[in-house]
Amino acid sequence: MRQTIVVLFFLLLSCAASAQIYVAVNGTDTADGTKEKPLASVTMALRKAREMRRLNDAAIVNGIHIVVGDGVYRFTEPLFVRPEDAGTASSPTTIEAAPGAQPIFSGGIDVKGWKKLTTPVVGLSKKAQGKIWVTDAPTLGGDLLDFRQLYINNQKAVRAKAYNGDTMSRILSWNKKTESCWIPKPAVDVSKVEGMEMFIHQWWAIAILRIKSMEVKGDSALLHFYQPESHIQSEHPWPSPWISSETGNSAFNLVNALQFLDSPGEWYLDKKTRKLYYWPRSGENMTTTTVVAPVLETLVKVEGTAERPVSNFSVKGISFQHTTWMRPSQQGHVPLQAGLFMLDAYKLKVPGTPEKKTLENQAWLGRPSASVEVSFANGIAFENCTFTHLASTGLDFGKGIKNSSIIGNSFQDVGGNAILAGVFSDEATETHLAYNSADEREVTENISIENNLVNNVGTEDWGCVGIGAGYVRSTTISHNDLSELPYTGISLGWGWTKDKNVMQNNRVAANRIVRYAQHMYDVAAIYTLSAQPNTFITDNYADSIYKAPYAHLPHHWFYLYSDEGSSYITVKNNWTPSKKFLQNANGPGNVWENNGPMVNDSVKNISGLQPAYRSLLRNKIVFNTRQEITHELPVVFELIAPSGQTVDVGRVKQAFAEADVYSTQFYSWQNHLVLYDKVGDASQLKRKLEKSFPDLKVKLYEDAFYEFNRTHCGDTTTAREWDNILLTANLVNNAKLQKEYLDYHATQFQKWPEVSNGFCKANFQQLLVYKNGRQLMLVINIPKGESLDKLNPKTTENNPRVEEWNRRMAKYQEGIQGTKKGETWVFLQRINN
């Protein structure tokens, strides 16, 4: 009995020895910090905790809990967590939400005093008259507050831009020598507007350029830009503005002019008159609406040193909101990749450096700000927090982070990357140099990024990623749910080299990545760079890639993508709808095994958030309900030998195998060899084939302009296995007739429904028509074991409109070279292995 009493006394003593410091919006910073007399700010609570540690207060033996009550806490400066705030393994420090509370750490200020605009304003369109509300622009210490985001009832408003929604225009040309750009003449006169910006889409990154001058000439306008972004944009080669008559030049938008304020949800800050204008959305009452303008770029800095890291410090249940990011307004923004912007960059006149003989460009990078920044810390944890309404990175675990975790958090409406971890490139280090720190204390390692919801990020910088890890070691990224992403889901590695570096023993497992590549291509669900010995990418689920409207190469997207220098990485058991993967300029030691649609469906079931964290999915939103998901189709490669010769099938198959295309679907006719299958990077493969077979003509058919499938039938069921019938013909050499032919197919389902009804009756599974120049490729998919001769007559059975269709189409078609007189469609013969 006495032993029981002693144990109970000890337990009570232990519980009592955990210090509680309370914070509430109605508290005062001169209070004691008790539950009854809470403090008003987390800053003062942290100071109190610091003093308790300095004085070795007996109450902290089991740790310190700073308990934050419900409400919004406006920060006027970042909360600075110093080495003196570090806890110990037995006495950690925790900032946490009170039970049932949802405290918000906000870097914004309320904008009030809105009134309906009743007087004319020069530059405001007639369309906007009578619809605009105005208030005095917010100031701090008498100075105008500049900002790039505005939140109306916790929904981000749109900074006034020339083209609304997802619409953009395309540049006409780019002159790298004069650092200038021609664009179509804007619809409104903005030639004298100051503070206007150009937002440009280029490959896998965007750029934001401050416009110095605009000179209108006829139907075009010439733009010049401010420095430093002007010379960086024109001198750096990767990525640069895309110029292509085939796929269209780089898309762009013009942003930040009163003349562009022409639709609900848009706003404009007039710095000269110190007025803020807004066109309310439906249902918004500006006399009662909450409007927040962000002030701070960073809310919390956890910053130690190599000698004295911040340790044993946790943040739980806090919402971080309303940050800004002003660099684009001050120096422009020209990123290399994943939002890391170039401080200087240029193409080398004479390629090659001591470290990389083929390197033809150099770049030095800066790192975007984050709402929470951590450096030189050990045993740091962020759990069950919310990161939302942020202009740049959400949470950044930078240099020298050890044994720390990011678990169970939600990242939504984030302007940049949701999470960054590890060194990418220090500002003084050329970005292609492998990172091998002489000081092991700098290396970020043993990090767990698990069970986080990443949804709708990269809203300001489309080239940002969901989770980006640079030079990290022994880091696990697992069971995260990522969706609504403008670019890549998870990016692991940096440097573009197979050289030895600090990276090793990393693991990316059981993540769910869907609905990505909203805007950018050269993209993947999971992307890697450089040498990473003993790194595993396993059991992930990737699906549903967006059809980006302005992609420079529409088919240059992937589920898994190991890029330059990727080495010693095992990629295994990842479920994807097809084997659309890319291994580009990889180093040695990679293992790819059992990836694609054949992987057991159990991988889908275990991917993403684990049961204890699935409540986060309640807040998940599908934002782009009208944007098309890419419908992946096979492509057709045709290799044509000179007349009278044949293609060496064995050599061609070997070339495809070397490109990881192990297809059995080869077809031939005379001097033509055809492959029909899904491949990874069709454009890159075409270039390889042209190089390997200079004596052959290589043609790629990758855009089916017509597709019939069973969704057009009453019975939508499909056969488990198909046989493919391939035919080819030419369109007649008449541009007008060619257009008529394409127009007929574009409207066939609406104006000639009997044709698809005939296909349904014949049990065709799918029918695709591709075009390259004048040549057509027709692919008819029928149930395996069936005969086209048996099925095809059913298309016209009691269906005279199909017979009429066939007669009409005949006048548009003719045989390819080598066909007999009167012969139009050529059946390609399957080559059996």
Image (cartoon, rainbow, N blue to C red):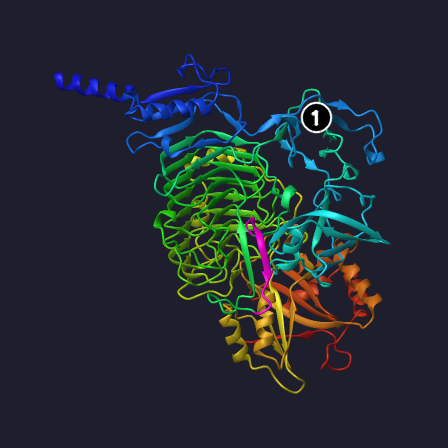
Q: Position of residue 252 (x, y in %)?
A: 71, 50
Amino acid at the residue labelled 1: Glu
Q: Position of residue 815 (x, y in %)?
A: 74, 76
Q: Position of residue 264 (x, y in %)?
A: 74, 33
Query: Which image quadrant for residue 707?
Result: bottom right
Name of the residue lying farthest toward the front: 142
Residue for point 64% across, 24% down: 290
Nearer to me, 378 or 279: 378
Residue for point 39% across, 48% down: 442
Residue for point 25% across, 18% down: 12
Residue 274 placement, left or right of 663: right
Considering the numbered disc 1 on the image, is that residue within a helix, a strand or a loop? loop
Name of the residue lying farthest toward the right: 218
Query: Which image quadrant for residue 348?
Result: bottom right
State yes or no: residue 339 in magenta. yes
Q: Is residue 520 above or below residue 321?
A: below
For the stretch drawn in magenta, what is the main secondary structure?
strand
State yes or no: residue 742 in magenta. no
Q: Is residue 797 above or below residue 9?
A: below
Q: Position of residue 141 (x, y in %)?
A: 62, 26
Name of the residue lying farthest toward the left: 2
Magenta span of residues: 337-350
Residue under label 1, please give it: 284
Nearer to me, 668 or 365: 365
Residue 226 placement, left or right of 441: right
